[in-house]
């Protein structure tokens, strides 16, 4: 009987120990899980930027992005906890002051979480976007007497060619390459040309779509330019030049008076426009230039 009691007590104690051990096992497993470090997959860090967390080593996530106080996303943009603006993957900086990125103009001050927009820089020449638009010929009331201070008279030189014209290639510049100054009296000019007009008291003859100075018709005639002038819309030379001056004003190249004179200021404006438009710098009223200006 005593043996049976002892066996019974031993069984009860064994069952109690087993029960305690079974109950303690989940707690031990939980403790081990807490102590066990989290396994992560490491991806190569992006090269578009660096984390800027002050005094804290960043933690690398499974996406390969650094997450600190000021973490860097995979697109290379800084997103600080305090809402500071960062750098996007395009390298454009968002500033609270609205400072423009290189090569543009800020359209508005940046705000947290917004990308500042920029616009391309304006062209140096005002109104350049209007280039090539059709221009309707106009008639201008130009001064009756030339302002020789702004457009001094050129001197006649027998057989003179236009300087630099040998470099102007193409059939549209043949008239300039072939031009040379000639001196003849009135009878000769009338016998060779039946279309002669007078501008500021000086005769011009028309030939093959251009106006030319008729040197010698009046020995003291005034010319501001010794060379061909494209006969735009068959207007007389002063009206052609006045129309050209007007268009160059609209394009922002000419700042002077619309006086119908092909003087130094007008020729400089023509050269500037031709250079900007990729045309030969004739500084003259030629057909390709007027076509580019929308006049021919």
Image (cartoon, grey):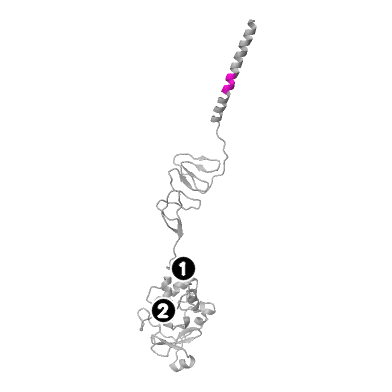
Q: Which residue in the protein does label 2 denote?
A: 242
User: Could you tell me residue 169's position as x and y percent?
Assistant: 53, 77
From the viewer's perspective, is 125 left or right of 149?
right
Q: Quadrant of the N terminus?
A: top right
Of residues 194 and 271, the one drawn nearer to the viewer in this rendering:
194
Magenta includes 240?
no
- Disc 2 crowd rating (10 Å Cα; few below 14, some 14-19, many 20+) is many
For the point 45% across and 72% down, the residue is 273
Residue 230 seen: no
Mark before the other along the chain sequence, 2 or 1 = 1
What is the x, y in percent for residue 27? Answer: 55, 25
Residue 114 — which label? none
Tell me the chief SS of the magenta region: helix
Residues 86 and 264: in front is 86
**Which residue in the structure is indicated by mark 1?**
129
Question: Extreme top residue here?
Answer: 1
Magenta stretch? 19-24
Residue at figure coordinates x 58%, y 24% from the top left = 25
Q: Secondary structure at mark 2?
A: helix
Q: Is residue 205 above or below residue 34?
A: below
Q: Please state which of residues 140 and 242 is positioned toward the viewer in this rendering.
A: 140
């Amino acid at each position: 009987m005593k043996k049976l009691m002892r066996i019974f007590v031993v069984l009860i104690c064994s069952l109690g120990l087993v029960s305690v051990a079974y109950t303690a096992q989940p707690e031990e497993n939980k403790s081990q899980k807490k102590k066990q470090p989290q396994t992560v997959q490491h991806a190569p860090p992006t090269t578009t930027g660096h984390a800027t967390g002050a005094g804290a080593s960043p933690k690398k996530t499974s996406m390969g992005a650094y997450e600190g106080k000021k973490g860097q996303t995979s697109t290379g943009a800084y997103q600080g906890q305090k809402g500071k603006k960062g750098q996007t993957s395009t390298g454009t900086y968002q500033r609270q002051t609205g400072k423009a990125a290189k090569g543009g103009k800020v359209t508005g001050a940046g705000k947290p979480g917004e990308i500042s927009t920029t616009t391309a820089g304006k062209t140096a020449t005002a109104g350049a976007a209007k280039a090539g638009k059709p221009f309707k010929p106009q008639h201008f009331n130009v001064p009756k007497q030339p302002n020789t201070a702004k457009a001094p008279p050129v001197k006649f030189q027998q057989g003179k060619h236009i300087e630099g014209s040998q470099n102007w290639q193409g059939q549209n510049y043949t008239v300039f390459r072939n031009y040379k100054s000639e001196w003849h009296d009135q009878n000769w000019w009338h016998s060779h040309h039946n279309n002669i007009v007078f501008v500021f008291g000086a005769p011009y003859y028309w030939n093959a779509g251009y106006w030319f100075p008729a040197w010698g018709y009046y020995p003291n005639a005034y010319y501001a330019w010794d060379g061909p002038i494209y006969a735009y819309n068959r207007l007389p030379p002063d009206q052609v030049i006045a129309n050209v001056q007007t268009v160059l004003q609209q394009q922002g190249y000419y700042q002077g008076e619309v006086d119908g004179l092909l003087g130094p200021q007008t020729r400089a404006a023509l050269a500037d426009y031709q250079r900007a438009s990729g045309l030969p710098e004739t500084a003259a009223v030629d057909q390709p230039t007027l076509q580019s200006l929308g006049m021919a």
